Image (spheres, rainbow, N blue to C red):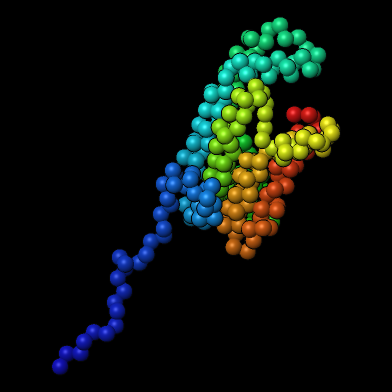
Amino acid sequence: MDQPETADRADPESTPEAPKLPSLPTRALNVFFSPGEVMAGLKDNPAWVGALVVGAALTVSGAVLLPAEILEATMRQQIIERGGSADNIETMARIGRIVGIGGAAVFWFVMSAAMAGLLTLIFAFILGDRGRYKQYLAVLAHAFLISAVGVLAVLPLKIAAQDASLLLSVGTFLPFLEEGYFARVLGFVDLFGLWSWAVVGIGVAALEPKRTVGGAVGIVMVIPIALAMIFGIFGG
């Protein structure tokens, strides 16, 4: 009598594959609501091009949508406050608008590449994490979609205040502070930027199992604070 087969045979085609990375629109949405899930997926699939292009497009849109007259008024006020002449302000504002729109995209790519390099230096080379440059760039490109959306979110406030330089910062909610270095530093601590850097910290922790989210966020937050302190020295 034949014996029934009781042992399962391994089917090589049934081996589960690594989960595919969600589409870019899904990742862009989830970075706001489920950043840990997005960052975990980027560990094995460090896609960065699409997120970086979307971020640049959003920042350029913010520059394009800002009314030219508001930029001109802001430039005029800043020049007068510094004791300069505003005779050619219309030409200066026109040139400034063109440079600002073109420069927004260039700055976005350069800034992202430089900050990814800084993350690689700090975590991979100094602290000994196993993350690679491409992974840190993917993390940063997705996390900074928050800052890019922030550019558009603050636009109505700029239009209402007729101030092209308006920034939604920690200092915005502390108007009682006396003018000085400390107030300037807090004025440069952008809230959308802090949110973005916090998500970067989540991504750094996702790349290195031994690193806690709290520890990674704490280290990463030194970067925007240090930048604000430097900007505060020079006044902008």
Residue found farthest to the top? 87
- Percent position (x, y) of residue 133? 58, 47
Residue found farthest to the left? 1
Indicate left or right for 134 with 211 as reference: left
- Percent position (x, y) of residue 211? 64, 61
Residue placed at 57% from the left, 45% from the top?
Answer: 143
Relative depth, front residue between 3 and 182: 182
Instruction: Indicate the quadrant where residue 213 lies.
Output: bottom right
Relative depth, front residue between 116 and 61: 61
Q: Quadrant of the N terminus?
A: bottom left
Q: Is residue 209 above or below residue 192?
A: below
Indicate left or right for 39 with 79 as reference: left
Instruction: Indicate the quadrant where residue 18 lies.
Output: bottom left
Q: Is residue 77 above or below residue 186?
A: above
Relative depth, front residue between 63 and 210: 63
Q: Can the viewer see residue 106 in this picture?
A: no
Indicate left or right for 39 with 88 as reference: left
